[in-house]
Image (spheres, coloured by chain):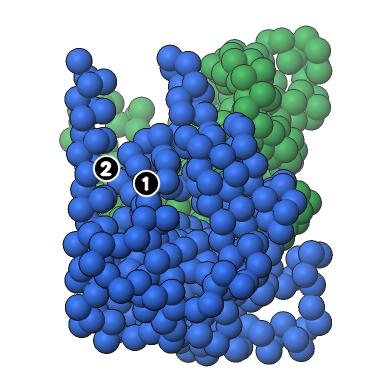
Amino acid sequence: MTPVPALDTQPMVALPSFPVRLRLESVHVDFPAANGPMRVVDGIDLDIRQGEFVSIIGPSGCGKTTLLNIVAGFVKPSSGRALLDDAPIEGPGPDRGVIFQEYGVFPWLTVRGNIEFGLRLAAARVSGAQRTEIVDRYMALMGLADFADHHPKHLSGGMRQRLALARAYAVKPEFLLMDEPFGALDAQTRTAMQDLLLQVLATEGKTVMLITHSVDEAIYLSSRIVVVTARPARVRTIIDVPFGYPRDEAVHEDPRFALLRAHIRGLVMKEYEAQARQAAAAAD
Amino acid sequence: MVHGTFALLKPQARNPATRIALLAAPWLALLLLWYGVRISGLINPSLVPAPHAVFLKFIALAQDRLALDIWMSTRRVVVGVFLGVLAAVPVGFAIGWYRGVHTFLDPLINFFRALPPIALIPLVIVYFGIGEAAKTAILFYASFFAGVIVMVEGIGQISPIYVQVSRTLGANDAEIFAKVIVPLAVPHILTAVRVALGVAWATLVASELIAAQQGLGALIQNASSFFQLDIIYVGIICIGLIALAMDLALRAATRRLVAWQDRIA
C-alpha cells in the first residue's frame, strides 16, 4: 500500500477489524487471441473487507471489467484464486448483485416486474405480501413509485440505472459489483446517482466493488481506491480515502480532495501513457 | 407508431377524415389507372376486364364456389404455416442459441432454403400424391424454412446481458429459459409467422395451379383454361386481400403482445 504523499491519511472506518470477504490471490487471466493467449490480468492480489467501498480505476481496456467479472463469477482465473469467504467463486449468485454499464433492465417487464424478478425465482422466493412490501420500498427509495407499471422504454437513462439498482437491492445481496454504472449518464444525473448510492448505502450497508475511470467518482464514493496498470492489469497502488461516511458533496471542497485527485490523476495518466506506448510498439 | 423504423416520418394526421382519405387514395388511384389503361386503348380492351365487371363477377362467384375456394386456400395456408412455424421455433432457437448446433445445421438450412418450394412440387406429387397431404407438405416446407431463418437471426440478436443479469439475481437454467429467453423470442416468433404467411400464400397458389379442384389457385387455373379474365382478376384480388387482412391482424396482435419493444414491426 503506497501512502499518499503530503496527506494525512485517516481510514474512515476501523476496517482492519472487519473480516475479509473477498480475496484475490495472484489472479492471472489469459484470453485466447489470434496470436496465442493474451494476458489481461497479471497477478492481482486484493482483499476486500466487510463494508468496504473499493473502487478499481485504470485506463479503459485495461482489464478492470475482467476483475469484476471474476468476482461476479462470469470469468474464472486462468491461475490464482478468487475467494468469497475463503471458498472459491464458482459462478454468479444472488449474494453478489451486479450493476452493468448498460443497465440490463428487462425491457419486456414493467418497473415493478423488473424489481420483483429475483423475488419470484426459486432461489429467493418470498410470499406475495412480502414481495409487494419489498418492491414498494425500493420503488420509493429510488424514486420510481410513479412509474410502477411503465415499461423501461418510457424511462430515462438515470431512471433505468435506478431501476437496475432497485432490482439488485431487492434480492438483498451482500455485495454490490458495479461496472462503470454511471458512465453513460449526463453530469447532473451522474452526481444525483452518486448521492443516491451513498444515501442507500448509509441505510443498507453493502460491500461494494466499483469499476470506474472517473477519479472524482472514485474519491467521492470509496473508502479505498485501487489503481491498476495498463493491460495486463496489475495493482499499481492502493490508496486509502481519508473521508468517513456518511459523506456528502462537501468533501469536494476539502483541500485533501484536490490533492488526492491530483495524485491519482497523475498515476492514471502515467498508465494511459504506458498504454499509448504499448499501442505504438504493437503498430511497429 | 412514431417510434422505431418510421421515426423519421412526420407524425400521422390526427384528423380521422384525413386519415381515411390518405388510406383510400392509393386504392382509388389504382382503380383510376385500371380504367385509364382500359380506355386509353394501349392494351386491347377485351384483354382488360373493367373493374365494375370484375366486381359483378365477384358477386356472382360469391354465390357459387368462391366461398369454398377461399376457405380451402385459407385453411391450407393456416395449417401449413401453423405446423411450419411450430417446427421452426425450436429448431431456429437451437441454431440461434447454441454455437455447435449452428455450425452443424446452418449450411444444411441454407441449402434447403435456397430451393424455391415451387421447384419441389413435382417431387411432392410423386411422394404425397395430389391430395391435401401434398399441399400441406409444400406449405410446411415453405413456412418452416422461412420461419427458421427469421428465428435464427432473431435469437442471435438477443443480448447475453439479460441472461447474465438473471444469473446474478439467482435464476437457474430453466428459469432463464422461461422468464428471459421466451419473452425475448416472442417478437421473433411473430415476425416468423408474418414472413411464413407471405411465403405460404405465394407457394399455395403455385401448388393449387398444378393440382387442385378447389382453392383460389384452382379457380384461377380453371378460368385461364377458358380465357375467363374477369375470374382470374377476382381470384388474384381475393388472394391479395386475404393476405393483407392476415398481415394487418398479425401486426395488430404484435402491437398488443410486444408493446414493450422500442421498435415495432
**Distance Cα–Cα, label 2 vs label 1:** 9 Å
Q: Pointers 2 and 1 in contact (CB under 8 A)?
A: yes
> Who's the residue at 69% across and 63% down the image?
A94
Q: Quadrant of the N terminus of chain A?
A: bottom left
| Residue B78 in view of the camera | yes
Residue annotated with mark 1 = A236
Q: Nearer the viewer, residue B77 or A4?
A: A4
Q: Secondary structure at mark 2?
A: helix
> Who's the residue at 72% across and 54% down the image?
A86
In the image, taking residue B133 as reference, residue B207 lies left or right, namely: left
Name the amino acid type tagged 2. Glu
Q: Quadrant of the C terminus of chain A?
A: top left
Number of numbered discs visible in the structure rendering: 2
> Who's the residue at 43% across and 70% down the image?
A223
CA neighbours of label 2 inside 10 A, class few (<14), some (14 to 19), many (20+): many
Residue annotated with mark 2 = A271
CA neighbours of label 1 inside 10 A, class few (<14), some (14 to 19), many (20+): some
> Who's the residue at 81% across and 27% down the image?
B133
Q: Mark 2 — on which chain does it sit? A: A
The image shows residue B202 at horizontal and vertical percentages of 54, 31
Q: Mark 1 — on which chain does it sit? A: A
Chain letter of the blue region: A
Chain letter of the green region: B
The image shows residue B118 at horizontal and vertical percentages of 59, 18
**B139 above or below A145?**
above
In the image, taking residue A42 as reference, residue A195 lies left or right, namely: left
Q: Quadrant of residue A187?
A: bottom left
| Residue B11 in view of the camera | no
Q: Secondary structure at mark 1?
A: strand
Name the amino acid type tagged 1. Arg
In the image, taking residue B71 as reference, residue A58 lies left or right, namely: left
